[in-house]
Image (cartoon, grey):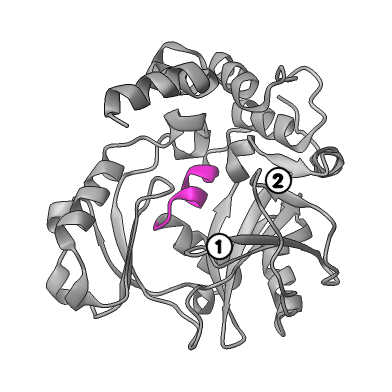
Amino acid sequence: MSKLKKFFHYLIHDRDKIKVFLLHKFSYFYSDEQFLRKLYRLRIGEELNLENPQTFCEKLQWLKLYNRKPEYTQMVDKYAVKEYVADIIGEEYIIPTLGVWDRVEDIDWDSLPNQFVLKCTHDSGGLVICKDKSTLDIKNAVRKLKKSMKRNYFYGNREWPYKNVKPRIIAEQYMEIRGQKDLPDYKFFCFDGEPKYCQVIRDRNTKETIDFYDMEWNHMPFVGLNPIATNGETPVAKPLCIENMICICKKLSKNIPFSRIDLYVIDDKEYFGEITFFPASGIGWFRPEEWNYTFGSWIKLPQK
């Protein structure tokens, strides 16, 4: 199928996707509230209730608009957050930084080890994973990073903490579990300092699976926020360091209406990943849908 035919097929059969594309293309013309109302209606198929939000997704949109604390900017900056987290839980939980640069052209490729990770500090997606430096396509990596450096992640879905993050590139130590292709993500959904559930994501590079566990490590009967998410074929073993992981999450999420604290476990040692305020940008689905309301009931909205 030619590109022109593909375009018309897309235009006829995926009109909502076209509308979302155009909304993002001209997002600068809308206020934050106007944009979120339009995006929510197109993506979720419902009107956004900001006057009396009830669901998890509705309340995350409310928090985007009305819970804008200056410290949140540091907390989403992938470089600056390391100092913030180290001050709270200690330097030993921080993945080592190998370098930081203001421009892609300044990256010192020769100084980097055989394995490393490059990421942009101000967005989600500007990621280059190098497992073997001799086979790394540097031109492609540069192209990807330059594209990310030009983007202000805030305008994608109005996640305010990203708006004023300084764009930089950092190199980090490559982390792995020997004998495994992927590093499982442990993502704790925390409500005002209380972690309720841990979302475990496995096999990102093959067939991604998502499982939720409560704090006693009972498997939960729902999936989210990915609309096509499935559970893994095998249970996730309870981490030996789960109690300390919970303690870390309590400290990092204290006095925040909602945050997701991401951790890794390597050789029974915990490492900090990131702090996220809006998983799936608050535009996702739970199956069954009742869990959208359950999660929403745990978010206590602050005063405007």
Residue 258: mark in rendering:
2
| Nearest to the observer: residue 86 or residue 137 | 137
| Front residue (pair 173, 303) | 173
| Residue marked by disc 1 | 207
Q: Nearer the viewer, mark 1 or mark 2?
A: 1
Looking at the rendered structure, the number of numbered marks drawn on it comes to 2
Q: Earlier in the sequence, mark 1 or mark 2?
A: 1
Magenta region includes residue 266: no
Q: Which mark is residue 216?
A: none
User: Disc 2 marks which amino acid?
Assistant: Phe
User: Is 228 placed above or below 181 here?
Assistant: above
- Helix, strand or loop: magenta stretch: helix
**Quadrant location of the C terminus in the rendered image:** top right
Which image quadrant is residue 198 in? Answer: bottom right
Q: Viewer-proximal residue, 188 or 210?
A: 210
Q: Is residue 266 above or below residue 260?
A: below
Q: Quadrant of the N terminus?
A: top left
Q: Position of residue 94 (x, y in %)?
A: 48, 72
Q: Amino acid at mark 1?
A: Lys
Q: CA distance from mark 1 to mark 2?
A: 29 Å
Per the image, label 2 sits on a secondary structure element best described as loop
Residue at 80 percent of width and 53 percent of height: 222
Q: Residue at x 54, y 20 (%)?
A: 16
Q: In terms of secondary structure, where does tag 1 sit?
A: loop
Left or right: 5 with respect to 55?
left
Q: What range is drawn magenta here?
A: 71-79
State whether residue 24 appears in this view: no
Q: Position of residue 249 (x, y in %)?
A: 69, 64
Question: Is residue 267 at least partly visible in the picture?
Answer: yes
Q: Are marks 1 and 2 in contact (CB under 8 Å)?
A: no
Task: Look at 51% across and 21% down and name the residue there.
Answer: 13
Packing grade of label 2 (10 A; few <14, some 14-19, many >=20) is many
